[in-house]
Amino acid sequence: MTNSSMLAKTCFLLPPSFEEIIDGKGDRSSSWVRLNVGGKVFCTTIDTFTLREPDSMLAAMFSGRHPLNHEEGCVLLDRDGEYFGYILNWLRDGDVPAALEAHQYKQLLKEAEYFQPRGLIDAVA
């Protein structure tokens, strides 16, 4: 069993339901959400997207103001899943990834510019 298939089986969407999160109903802040980013599955809370970088695209996406593309319980994002993991970790703990090569920092910056976590952009640029 691959890591992503194990994650998909162990990551749950807790009440309120996924549809309530997408529709902006209920207490979304501590709700879990599952994302499929470029084929890689991630699980996190709405708080992760909104607390550290409240003006980011991810905070806006999960604010309840915008419809989200979803399938089989996952929000679908057509972006690079490898670099999204770094962005998610930045949102969780503020750590900039260490020991990346120059071309990897360039790609991370490209993804960060898309999702708009200003602190990460400033740290990587």
Image: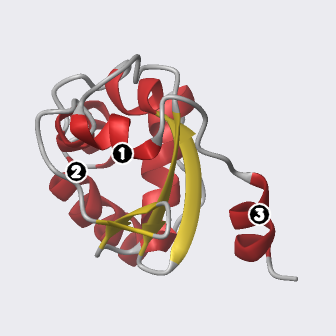
Q: Residue at 38%, 75% (x, y): give it.
A: 80
Mark 1 to mark 3 CA distance (whole Å): 19 Å
Q: Residue at 45%, 34% (x, y): give it.
A: 91
Labels 3 and 2: the sequence-earlier one: 3
Q: Give neighbour class at mark 3: few <14, some 14-19, many 20+ (Cα, 10 Å).
A: few
Mark 1 to mark 2 CA distance (whole Å): 23 Å
Q: Which amino acid type corresponds to the residue marked 3 in the rendered image?
A: Lys
Mark 3 to mark 2 CA distance (whole Å): 27 Å
**Mark 1 = which residue?**
19
Q: Give neighbour class at mark 2: few <14, some 14-19, many 20+ (Cα, 10 Å).
A: many
Please state the horizontal and vertical placement of residue 105, each as a whole percent of the image: 38, 64
Q: Nearer the viewer, residue 10 or 52?
A: 10
Reply above or below: 77 against 15: below
Q: Residue at 24%, 22% (x, y): give it.
A: 54
Q: Nearer the viewer, residue 30 or 97?
A: 30
Circle 2 sits in a helix, a strand or a loop, which is it? helix
- Left/right placement of residue 11 relative to residue 65 reads right
Please state the horizontal and vertical placement of residue 86, each as a whole percent of the image: 50, 54
Marks 1 & 3, CB-CB < 8 Å contact: no
Q: Which amino acid type corresponds to the residue marked 2 in the rendered image?
A: Phe
Please state the horizontal and vertical placement of residue 39, each as a whole percent of the image: 49, 81
Please state which of the two labelled residues, at mark 1 or mark 3, is closer to the viewer.
Answer: 1
Label annotation for residue 9: 3
Q: Nearer the viewer, residue 68 or 23?
A: 23
Circle 1 sits in a helix, a strand or a loop, which is it? helix
Looking at the figure, which quarter contains the N terminus?
Answer: bottom right
What is the basis of the colouring in this image?
Answer: secondary structure
- Left/right placement of residue 20 relative to residue 7 reads left
Please state which of the two labelled residues, at mark 3 or mark 2, is closer to the viewer.
Answer: 3
Labels 1 and 3: the sequence-earlier one: 3
**Mark 2 = which residue?**
115
